[in-house]
Image: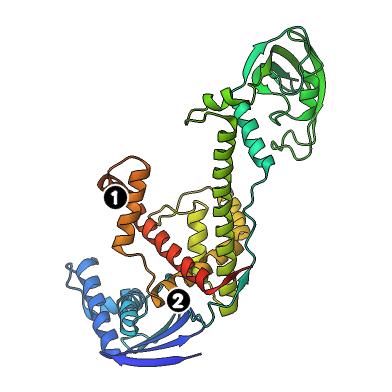
Amino acid sequence: MADQSTTTGGLQVSVEEQSSYGRRISVTVPPERVRRIRQSVTAQITRNVRLPGFRKGKLPDSLVQKQFGQAIEQETVDRVIQETYREALEQEGIRPINQGAVSDVHYHGDGGELHYHVELEVQPSVELARTGGFVIARPSDAVADAEIDSILERLRSERATFHTVDDRKPDQGDEVQVRITPQAADDAEEEPQPEEYKFVLGEGQAIQPIEEAIMSLMPGEEGEFDIAFPEEFGDPAMAGQTKHMKIGVVELRRREFPELDDEFAQSMGGGFDTLEALRERIGGDLREEARGRADSAFRDALLDQVVEANSVEAPRSMVDNYLEYMTGGATPAGRARQRTPEQEERFSQFREMMRPQAEAAIKRMLVVETLADREGLRATSDDLDARVEALAQQHGRQPGDVWLELEKSGQLQQLEAQLTEEKVLGWLQQQNTAG
């Protein structure tokens, strides 16, 4: 790897490129600078300590060295590194993306030369030799009639009316209000209290054994049942267990759906005169969503191809920061959230599971940033003004109010990054072919 060395103002610095983003910095601080810092440390300690028989600030140098020599040397090392580390970075024009790790500190004491290493990461310099010539399969954006029918059925369900019935047992699609009392544990001091629930049978809100028990009862009836909970049940205390329960049907209501006709379409608002007009609107919305998903999938696949073709690397520190933020480990301001050891263990496992996705996201981001600079595709103030104006018009607000709100919430910068990404992805699409 490349190694370069410079000396400025007595500070000798060399930089070894361990990878496209890894740097190992060697810093040598000359004796005269170390002695100057050591003298300052010694003077500060002399001014501030008290020893019996001596006035404050009047300790003999020999006694100071004898009593505090080790502390002086350690404080000297700490101050020399603190003072010269940032200076070395500025001298070499290095902008780290993580806190460097100091190692291999060599200092023999008494103001001699001090040498140390720092390992850190910088945002990698991405060389994109190939950005075109890819053929990417674009997902279909077709919308089937069944998808439109499904939306219409959901709208019918939302506008269904319920009518109380008491002359039959519950069936799928009925809304029931039930009272469930679990069996008391052997060591329980009090009887468990019944709890009431209201839900629609057949929509997965209750496990099948409970629904079967409910459907065996008439309204007003109550029975006792052994309910077998599945192994994958959400509550670990119940999963795979069989519990004895008392179940009663408090109320049964039959659900009636409106007819799918022109009158139903008119009741939806939006100026639909016929059912066919409503279907066309639903189909148009679904097709727009499908096109958006297909475009997004195409662009992700295209970015992945560019990343792979150019061997883009993701610095671990950038991935870690991304994972911390995305999993709620850090606030938007970058401060760590407090968690119990158990919570931290769960989050740690989740972060490792998400690491491949995070690495892919960082690599794609680096490609976008590199192309934005190389091809002059960064969002301009005019681009930002136009998008804010479009958002304001969409929500019936004044552009100035929207701008101030976005700026105050910190979302203006995110919007600028989004516009830049859109321009880069549009440029990439022009260089490549959708299969």
Which percent across, then down, holds residue 233? 73, 37
Q: Amino acid at mark 2?
A: Leu
For the point 25% across and 76% down, the residue is 42
Q: In the rendered image of this protein, does residue 27 appear above or below residue 289?
A: below
Report crowding for label 1: few under 14, some 14 to 19, many 20 or more residues within 10 A (C-alpha): some
Q: In the rendered image of this protein, does residue 22 appear above or below residue 138?
A: below
Q: Which mark is residue 403?
A: 1
For the point 65% across and 12% down, the residue is 163
Please state which of residues 34 and 387 is positioned toward the viewer in this rendering: 387
Which percent across, then down, holds residue 301? 60, 66
Q: Amino acid at mark 1?
A: Trp
Please state which of residues 55 and 375 is positioned toward the viewer in this rendering: 375
Count of labels in the image: 2
How is the model colour-coded? rainbow
Quadrant in which the C terminus appears: bottom right
For the point 69% across and 37% down, the residue is 234
Look at mark 2 in the image and give the residue it sits on: 120
Which percent across, then down, holds residue 46? 22, 72
Q: Give the distance between the C-alpha atoms of the residues marked 1 and 2, in whole angstroms.
A: 38 Å
Seen in the image, is 68 located left or right of residue 213? left
Please state which of residues 2 and 120 is positioned toward the viewer in this rendering: 2
Which percent across, then down, holds residue 280? 57, 39
Image quadrant of residue 14? bottom left
